[in-house]
Image (tube, helix red, strand yellow):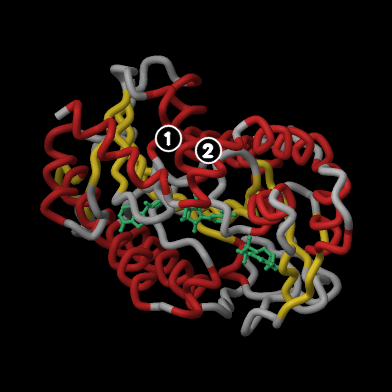
Amino acid sequence: MKKVLVTGGAGFIGSNFLSYMVDKHQDWAFVNLDALTYAGNLENLKSLETNDRYVFIKGDITDTGLVSSLFKEHGFDYVVNFAAESHVDRSIKEPEVFLKTNVFGTQCLLDNAKSSWQTGKDGDGYPVYRDGVKFLQVSTDEVYGALGASGMFTETTPLAPNSPYSACKASADLIVRAYSKTYKLPVNITRCSNNYGPYQFPEKLIPLMIGNALEDKSLPVYGDGMQIRDWLHVGDHCSAIDAVLEKGRAGEVYNIGGNNEKANIDIVRLILERLQKSDTLIRHVEDRLGHDRRYAIDNAKITGELGWKPAYTFERGMDETIAWYLNNKEWLGDVRSGAYMDYYNKYYRELT
Ligand code: NAD
Ligand code: TYD
């Protein structure tokens, strides 16, 4: 039996992770702490609402009083920190909130985990923690910066973030590392590539392009569209985090990639082809400032050490993802129109 604090569980990856974990670990209990920013959507978690091993708490990870009281009430064994401002374009316009949530929020969670889990000190003055606890920080390959035409990111690639978003994620990684080195807090950091799949907020490339194509709106491709990302199905990301949580060696970083390097323009063309829409919807627009040209992940550590590997091919993942958005046009429409924001008021207020 494990008690798990999942932060940012109403977002894209967090909600997929909660659904996956509640089903997979039938004797574990989960608390989802989420501030419900524009990116948080409780409709993603409808299937868990009546599950007695799942609790939702609306709150901010920077609120140390709240986080401390949750640790006292629930006695968490694991923390999985997804909560973050996650969109590069927004970080270019408004960096401040990225620092607050991604850096100070992470430090607040670390501090509370440390004080809640500490049972004493060893002979050298280092804290000692109760058995079976772990803090897992969900990070990104973007902390490594951009690659040229060849090469891949390994866990020892130096950090060289280029956007305010990735700089804040890298800062959070470094503070997590510091808690591991200075206080010997049992931590793991995972750095994954671009995720895709159900419930992704449609400001990100794949759901944005699907939504626009369905409405016959133009598809904005930044610059020449030849930027390359590695694409990881969110289901594969969830199973990888589960593997790191259970088997990852304390203090280690694990890269998670899907072995699917694609140019943005090829993804956009594939979506148009599957939806039987014309290429004339493509519109090349001004490039993103500081746009990273290429990301690629070397998976050798997690596959070799933990036995994880991605189950999805890109073709299957994209077919299922496009089918999901076609079958969930109401969800997509509600998010695109902003109507999803009423869900908390409509449902959760009635419960309390
Ligand atoms: P998302 O933007 O869809 O969801 C983020 C969630 O965090 C939302 O539910 C939001 O309400 C919540 N949140 C934001 N600020 C908060 C705060 N101060 N307190 C509590 N909750 C808060 O993001 P996502 O795509 O699901 O990404 C999850 C994590 O994975 C992030 O840490 C992100 O950096 C990382 N990541 C994402 C990708 C990707 O492709 N989506 C790739 C690599 C890493
Ligand atoms: P995005 O989904 O924002 O993820 P990230 O910036 O974290 O990689 O963007 C993925 C790629 O798609 C990135 O190279 C920027 C590009 N892009 C576009 O060309 N047009 C768009 O409208 C968006 C949102 C992204």
Q: Which residue is mark 1?
A: 43
Which one is in front, 177 or 52? 52
The residue under the point 75% across, 69% down is 221
Tell whether label 2 touches label 1 (CB within 8 Å): yes
Quadrant (top left, top right, bottom left, bottom right) of the N terminus: top left
Q: Quadrant of residue 253?
A: bottom right
At label 2, counting other C-alpha atoms closer than 10 Å, the crowd grade (few under 14, some 14-19, many 20 or more) is some
Return the residue found at the far front. Answer: 216
The residue under the point 28% across, 67% down is 104
The residue under the point 19% across, 46% down is 118
Q: Position of residue 312 (x, y in %)?
A: 75, 35
Q: Position of residue 58 (x, y in %)?
A: 24, 44
At label 1, counting other C-alpha atoms closer than 10 Å, the crowd grade (few under 14, some 14-19, many 20 or more) is some
Quadrant (top left, top right, bottom left, bottom right) of the C terminus: top left
Query: Could you say which disc has been placed on residue 331 in the image?
Result: 2
Q: Is residue 280 above or below residue 334?
A: below
Q: Quadrant of residue 76?
A: top left
Q: Earlier in the sequence, mark 1 or mark 2?
A: 1
